[in-house]
Amino acid sequence: MAKAAEMPRFKLNTGQYIPAVGLGTWQAKPGEVGEAVKYAIKVGYRHIDCAKAYGNEKEIGDALQELFKEGIVTRGDLWITSKLWNSDQHPDDVPLALAGSVQDLQCDYLDLYLMHWPVALKKGAQGTAPEDFAPLDTKATWQAMEKCYEKGDKTKAIGISNFSVVKTKALLSYAKVVPAVNQVECHPMWQQKKLHDFLYSQGIHLTAYSPIGSGGSWFTKHVKVLEHPVLQSLAKKYNKTPAQIALRWNIEMGHSVLPKSTNPERIKENLHIFDFKISEEDLKLFDKIEQVRLLCGDDLWVNDTTSPYKTVEELWDGEI
Ligand SMILES: NC(=O)C1=CN([C@@H]2O[C@H](COP(=O)(O)OP(=O)(O)OC[C@H]3O[C@@H](n4cnc5c(N)ncnc54)[C@H](OP(=O)(O)O)[C@@H]3O)[C@@H](O)[C@H]2O)C=CC1
Ligand SMILES: CCCCCC/C=C/C=O
């Protein structure tokens, strides 16, 4: 069993250390997510990735409270991330949404609060139809995030998610607080080399979402990352699973990872990636893997009337 003390961490530009592995909670079902969080923390996870949009923060909060009451961990042992949903991007709504996530998660404060997408929806919007969109003002939203950070009581760090190089550069042109993290899709079949180089040149940490290729949903491409021959053959060579190879590749790149599972065996499996290293020679095999973005966002955030993005290329500034 991995001990929490053994969990490697990456240093952020705030001076804090983010645990290298966090439990993903998107699409973790009601009635399952709380058990998954409790099990994960008991076997050594110290980082939970949450979001208001996932609709399960309250159940995660109940699970955290149980762990605190049982004395399994204290709040200070954990790293909790949540995300500002697109319908809360108006500057007046940002502190309220942050306070709402802290309240649901019952955790006093967040370690990291991310702007979930460079997309604005109307307050209270439930969907992603053209009539749900609001004008995008990333500068105003980021400035409201900065105020929350400066206040310091509800979040210890702020960051972004799903920002391309171009969008990150634009934000840096006015940011007083450099984002600590950009959380983006990243796995052996979508390696984000250009974004990685830019973020690390600016001292921004990359956290990898969908690090084992995602369970998928209607708007996610169903490409089987774990079946790729490079992962299959390295799994045999290192006596690991393809998922562990995929996760370890991200760790070798300097990225924290957020594998989602509600299955106890897989939760444990996804943590056991620190007793081996992929050799320099074997890392070169990843250079030849064909690249496919799984979560393109075109079904969600692209429309030719109200969205600022008329094409998927505009959403990702050509990084597609
Ligand atoms: N900022 C953003 O916009 C986004 C953030 N995220 C975050 O990243 C997390 C992870 O991404 P996600 O898209 O969920 O996908 P993952 O890459 O984590 O894949 C999750 C899927 O893989 C299965 N799985 C888990 N472990 C293994 C294993 N060892 N072997 C085989 N299959 C496995 C899971 O099923 P099972 O549960 O049955 O094990 C699930 O179906 C999210 O949960 C969320 O927290 C994700 C997408 C977007
Ligand atoms: C209402 C949920 C929409 C999810 C949009 C895509 C984000 C995925 C994970 O963060």
Image (spheres, rainbow, N blue to C red):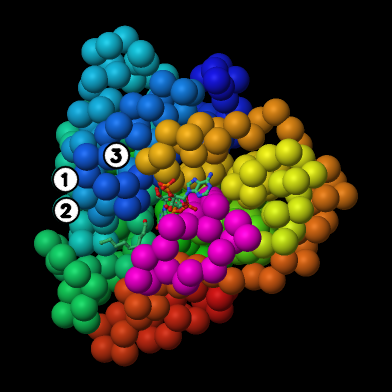
- Residue at the image position 64 percent from the left and 44 percent from the top: 241
Locate residue 239, reporting x and y percent.
73, 38
Give the mark, 2 or 3, whose residue is nearer the N terminus: 3
Does residue 173 appear in this view?
A: no
Amino acid at pointer 3 = Val
Q: Which mark is residue 92?
A: 2
Magenta stretch, residue numbers: 208-227
The residue positioned 42% from the left and 85% from the top of the image is 311
In the image, residue 223 above or below residue 31: below
Instruction: Tell me if 193 is positioned left or right of 156 in this view.
Output: right
Residue, disc 3: 33
Q: Are marks 3 and 1 in contact (CB under 8 Å)?
A: no
Instruction: Reply above or below: 65 against 223.
Output: above
Q: Is residue 43 left or right of residue 255?
A: left
Looking at the image, is mark 3 or mark 1 nearer the viewer?
3
Residue 244, percent from left and from top: 62, 42
SS category of the residue bearing label 1:
helix
Q: Secondary structure at mark 2?
A: loop
Q: Is residue 215 magenta?
A: yes
Q: Is residue 35 left or right of residue 277?
A: left
Disc 3 to disc 1, C-alpha distance: 24 Å
Q: Position of residue 87 (x, y in %)?
A: 21, 62
Look at label 1 and name its amino acid.
Leu
The dot on residue 96 is 1
Secondary-structure class at tag 3:
helix
